[in-house]
Image: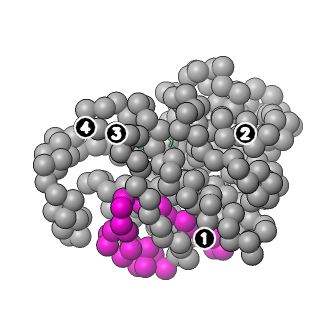
Amino acid sequence: VPLYLITPTYTRLTQKADLIRLSHTLMHIHNILWIVVEDRSSKSKLVTNLLDRSGIEHVHMNVETPKIFRLRPGDRKYMQHRGVEQRNLALDWIRMSYELSQGVVYFMDDDNTYDIELFHHIRKVNKVGIWPVGLSGGNDYEGPICENGKVTGWYTIWDTRRMFPIDMSGFAIHLQVLLDSPSVYWDRKSRVGNLESDLLISLGIERGDLEPIDDTCSQVLVWHTQTVKFEYLENRMERITIKNLEKYMDL
Ligand code: UGA
Ligand code: MN
């Protein structure tokens, strides 16, 4: 079963370090297609080179987040969802690639930490696979509570009204589910922290559909790590052109 791994990514000082880490994880996984979508008006040399060098089968696209949705310097990042247009472009690509009929889709941030063991579990997903995410939701971890391979509750402290309190990296969706709901996309209008839950609701998923990757959901195989921002340098970079940043990142 092929895995379609979708990663939005954007130009910043820590991008190369994050993508090297992610690509070196994915280099261990067979039968994957890595769909990398840059949040830019054109493809960067950095990502092009990194993808080629990885030897991973990939699709490389770009779409720039519309200006009204872009975070401005000084904005707190929860003010806008990130990676929405990029993931939606990847969804379009997948849905248009009519020769695809089986496989599992997984949305991966470029800065998380993934245990290669996770991908064995993802490959077995029939509808929607679900598992806990370390360092997520302002807690040691966040995710489903499971008994006998069924979700019976949620371990979460953040906006506990969410129907599916789970981070982006805590679930994977069978391709067929996405093909069956061709008009469902990631929704910018979702409330803070509700992007994931809203997508699953739009796909008509119910708690009983969820497939925990093990009977007890007690194993953490992915962490919502976040690379420290180089705020001082990046604030200066606002005045420096993107060309200079690329020169720096080609080092
Ligand atoms: C959390 C989730 O882990 C994200 O998957 C979700 O998109 C986000 O919340 C949200 O609510 O929008 P967090 O770790 O705080 O995300 O976000 P980032 O890692 O900064 O961004 C998520 C993805 O979007 C990353 O792959 C990042 O490279 C990309 N991104 C970020 C862009 O494409 N453009 C940006 O301007 C910022
Ligand atoms: Mn992230």
Q: Where is residue 146, by image quadrant?
A: top right
Any part of residue 133 in sight:
no
Q: Amino acid at mark 4?
A: Pro
- Determine whether label 3 and label 4 are within 8 Å by CB: no
Q: Amino acid at mark 1?
A: Leu
Q: Position of residue 36 (x, y in %)?
A: 49, 64
Q: Is residue 40 magenta?
A: yes
Residue linked to disc 2 = 202
Q: Residues within 10 Å of mark 1 (few under 14, many from 20)?
A: some
Sequence-earlier tag: 2 or 3: 3
What is the spatial separation of the Cα atoms under label 2 and label 3, in whole angstroms?
26 Å
Which region shows up in magenta? 29-55
Residue 71: image tag: 3
Q: Position of residue 78 (x, y in %)?
A: 42, 31
Does 116 appear above or below 192? below
Q: Amino acid at mark 3?
A: Leu
Sequence-earlier tag: 1 or 2: 1
Residue linked to disc 1 = 33
Residue linked to disc 4 = 73
Which residue is drawn at the image coordinates 60% and 70% (left, top)? Answer: 33
Q: Secondary structure at mark 2?
A: helix
What is the spatial separation of the Cα atoms under label 1 and label 2, in whole angstroms?
25 Å
Q: Amino acid at mark 2?
A: Ser
Does 66 appear above or below 142? below
Which residue is drawn at the image coordinates 31% and 42% (left, top)? Answer: 228
Sequence-earlier tag: 4 or 1: 1
